[in-house]
Image (cartoon, grey):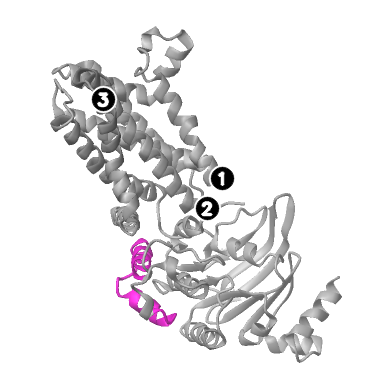
Amino acid sequence: MTNSAVTGTGLRVVRGGRDVLRGVGFAIPRGSVTGLLGPSGCGKTTLMRAVVGVQNVAEGTVEVLGRPAGHPDLRARVGYATQNPAVYADLTVAECLRYFAAVLGAPAHDVDRVLAEVDLADRAAQLVGSLSGGQRGRASLAVALLGEPELLVLDEPTVGLDPVLREDLWALFHRLAAAGTALVVSSHVMDEAARCDRLLFMREGHVLADDTPDGLRAKTGEQDLEQAFLRLARAAA
Amino acid sequence: MNATITAATTRRVLTQLRHDPRTVVMLLLVPTLLMTLLRFVFNDEHAFSRTAPALLGVFPFVIMFLVASVTTLRERTTATLERLMTMPMGKLDLILGYAIAFGAIAVVQVGIATTVSVLWLGLDVVGSVWTLLLIAVLDAVLGMALGLFVSAFATSEFQAIQFMPLFVLPQFLLCGLLQPRDRMGWLLNWLSDVMPLSYAVDALTRVTTSADVDTALVLDLVVVVGCVVAALALGAGTLRRRTD
């Protein structure tokens, strides 16, 4: 077994007649937080969908936990939170989580654990539809945490959160990584880059860099990661 | 197939409905309300007894078609379906979970409408009331199954709503209620032969006018059940794990 939870090779995805991913390769290690950063529309979500196995792929392969992405064996081992919260607005938070836990075959007490982890325990009896946008996003994140998956794919999980909650979630991500989980977290906000163990910089369907933050600083000679991104983007253009 | 996941889905759908009491009240009482209205439109028990059995099947059929197509369209257009498709959820588990939930609602809905029609509105049933109930429930389940299936072809709520006049009203016009089927032109007669509602209405009329459970009645029921199963299977077939 390799150290990589996910390996993508020559991945090409076409959507609406346009190349969204243009033959990208990447690796996502176990036990760490990999940040997927780049401007809106650069292909982050498509790459994540390919990893989860819900994206039709034109060329290339993605291997996840030793299986092709989307393999039936992976369905209880990979947690995925889409950018738009995928939770039922007409259920309470607890009812919604209990349903997904049953589908995943996760124990019922897992619901209380994930609610505490995303700091929504006091909202358990509230209807999802009456939550704020940020709370709804955290409810959706809680679903992804059910059953302690080995790989977590989180699309912009910290958007719209206040700085304290954002800090708490990043602490949670690193706690999960320390326990051996592989995490991929996307963001279009560069100031989150420094919080990641590894970075995948993306732009216009290409992966510009796949390195640690320190490695990127050394390679580009820039201390600031946003400047490092700019330098790589200019060099690629 | 996984019974636990199917049962969890049924419970989830019913819980969603429980949080929407107005929808539940309408689901359970609208067919009864319409039957009552029909009774006083005719203002005559005999005329009512001629038309009522067919409409006892048609009203729940229409309502279940609408509710099922909108509910599943909502699941398809929000990200929850995609999320479920990344989980150990079988396509048939999801469809059957929905079918059992709406089927249970249909039993209560049709039960109320039949009870009220027989006890208070003067519906005269020569055959068994239980058979009548069974057929009417099958009609509702058929409407639900067709609704689940055609929702796959709707990309917006506007389209889904319009599938009702497109898929349901022609079946209503051709089912033999307005004009006996054998008196229609050959094309319409043929069309009514391939529409499942025709067999459902045929069976309802048979059971109210005759006490025998004959081959024709059994054949009608087999066709309706076959259409329910086919629509559910096709509905499951329209779910996709991978999309563009």
Residue at 34% across / 19% down in the picture?
A: B177
Amino acid type of the residue that numbered disc 3 sits on in the rendered structure:
Ala
In which chain is the residue bearing label 1?
B
The residues tagged by marks 3 and 2 sit, at their Cα atoms, a distance apart of 38 Å
Quadrant assignment, res A200: bottom right
What SS does tag 1 mark? Answer: loop
Co-location on one chain, circles 3 and 2: yes
Question: N-terminal of the two: label 2 or label 1?
Answer: 2
* Residue A88: percent from left, percent from top: 42, 61
Q: Amino acid at mark 2?
A: Thr
Residue B158 appears at what percent x and percent y?
54, 43
Q: Which SS class for mark 3?
A: helix
- In front: B68, or A80? B68
Labels 3 & 1 near each other (Cβ < 8 A): no
Q: Relative to B73, say whether A10 is above or below.
A: below
- State the residue in front, A94 or A75: A94
Q: Which residue is mark 3?
A: B52
Can you see residue B239?
A: yes
Q: Which mark is residue B77?
A: 2
Q: Alpha carbon of mark 2 to alpha carbon of mark 1: how far?
A: 8 Å
What's the magenta bit mostly, secondary-structure-wise? helix
Q: Amino acid at mark 1?
A: Thr
Answer with left or right where residue B87 lies relative to residue A5: left
The answer as to whether the residues below labels 2 and 1 share one chain is yes
> Nearer the observer, disc 3 or disc 2?
3
Q: Which residue is mark 1?
A: B155
Q: Magenta residues, as a range?
A: A94-120
What is the chain letter for disc 3?
A: B
**In the rendered view, would you say A205 is above or below B50?**
below
Q: Are marks 2 and 1 in contact (CB under 8 Å)?
A: yes
Looking at the image, is B241 positioned above or below residue A176? Answer: above
B42 or A43, nearer to the observer:
B42
